[in-house]
Image (cartoon, rainbow, N blue to C red):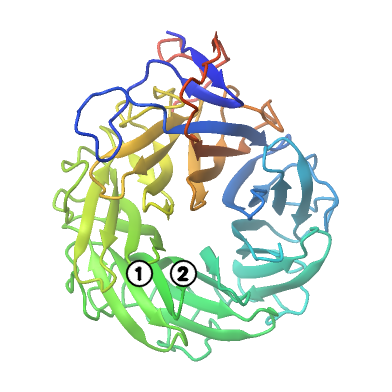
Amino acid sequence: MKRHFAFLGAALILIGCQSLPPEGSTTPGSSAPHLYEAVFSTYLGGEGGEFAFGVAADDRERVYVTGYTHSPDFPVKNGYQMEKKDGESVFVTVFDSAGQSLLWSTFIGGATGGSEGFTVQVDSAYGVYVNGATTASDFPTANAYQAYHHGAWDSFALKLSSTGSTLLYSTFLGGNNDDWAYKSSLDSEGSFYFAGKTLSPDFPTVNPYQGAFSHSWDAYVVKLSPSGSALVFSTYLGTTNPDIGEMALARGDKVYVIGNTGGGDFPVRDAYQPVKAGAEDAFITVLSASGSAVLYSTFLGGSGHETGRALEVDRDGEIYATGACGSDDFPLVNPYLSVRRSGDSWVSKLTSSGSALVFSTLLGGSSSDTSKHICIDDEKNVYVPGHTNSPDFPTVDPFQAFHSKHYDGFLSVLSSTGSFLLFSTYLGGSAKDEHYAAWASGKGTAYISGQTSSLDFPTLNAFQPAFGGVSDGYVARFRRVPAAPPAAAVAPANRLPQPSDPTDPPDPSDPAE
């Protein structure tokens, strides 16, 4: 079965798809206009392998992407480093708002090891901040807090000029063992916050809440000064069991941290859930602006295994979080889905005090489903990207209605109540596809990035419409559909190339997963 699409302006809209009534509708099942549309979807890669880990956008809707590449022919333009050195290298790429033109793009890496960019942020002057991890002792540094490579994998943080041609600062951050940096945020002054995990007993600490390494992997949280040459604070956050910090989010005079822990002695304060329930629970912790005090901290989980992947905070201080769920008794309140069928994602909203759940729901189908990020818009609708192997993952008004093969990416938009989906779509081809990051504007525009091994990944208005090789990064933009004029005409249907139908014969050269 092939699918039929129609154009409305420049965006792709599925005809005859499932839809749900908008929030407040009193007529279940009534027809409704499309709420979201695709603006562009593009490959990003060369002849080697790529992964687009991080994505962001500025107030002009220009799109910033980072990740890693093995390709010497990865598209670069007007960049700080125009030739790739040996091994894998960080890339930082900026598109125009239409996703069709490359404004600038650069490699960043050394010749003595591999380097991976994980997240990207952009400030009001369009300076670009990237963090990640590297094994390269000659990774480029400038105005560094730590100018030398210390362990096997060290974290790094850097800032590029708005043109991408100048490295304003770049620093290692690590001890004598492995250190990994994960999701990040900026404050209005240009301080760079991120969380991660470390095996180093000598990871650098400054004004810490916890100054000593605990055991195995510890989470860490850092605030880097606007110049990149000093740590404002740096602290372990760990127990006698493994702990991973997945994201540090600066909001006002607080720093919100999410991750997962296997330790029952993880610090808690004024907790919604004061006791660890399973082998591994998610945690949500709020640090003071100085990083030296825990203002709030809670476990969140059931009797199995949970991870905490990302969080966001709205204008009222309410906390939104997501991760992977492995428990049948994960705490749920006003859920969209209440029964776990396999490895589902969880999406929860806590009050500003953290003392209660506003809503908490599962999200998934009959196979494995993993959320990777979370964003909100001005109406407090919740955007969740990830990847799924479920042929029955819930879809609503989808760009792509069916699971193609292997893992597909997904993007789901939950209502502000968490009780139903406004939009949910697969995005993938006939090989493996993973959504990793998302960024949402207040007006309902969402950007997603990830990795695909599919030669038939769905593209639209693409900078790079064809697969580069091995695996490519990808970037896509969706937006809330503007209200149409009363008598707006709909263009005739068009047929576009789509991923192979799941009933097509399998490719004998495709290795089984």
Query: Label 2, on which residue?
Result: 248
Query: Which quadrant holds residue 158?
Result: bottom right
Residue 81 point in image, percent of width and height? 83, 56
Image vertical order of residue 224 relative to residue 482, above or below? below
Residue closest to the far left: 329
Q: Is residue 367 above or below residue 227?
A: above
Kind of residue sitting beneath label 2: Ala
Residue 147 percent location from the top left of the image: 73, 79
Q: Residue 157: image x %, image y %?
A: 64, 69
**Which structural element holds mark 1?**
loop
For the point 64% across and 48% down, the residue is: 61
Q: Depth check: give the residue in front, 221 or 2.
A: 2
| Residue 157 shown left or right of residue 197 in the figure | right
Name the element at disc 2: strand
**Mark 2 against mark 1, which lies toward the viewer?**
1
Number of numbered discs on residues: 2
Distance (Cα) linking label 2 and label 1? 15 Å
Residue for badge 1: 317
Is residue 403 placed above or below 339 in the rendered structure?
above
Residue at figure coordinates x 64%, y 33% from the top left: 42
Q: Earlier in the sequence, mark 2 or mark 1?
A: 2
Residue 56 is tagged as none
Establish if 292 lies above or below 282.
Answer: below
Q: Identify the residue at horizontal 31%, vertical 45% (top origin).
A: 415
Which three-letter amino acid code belongs to the residue tagged 1?
Answer: Gly
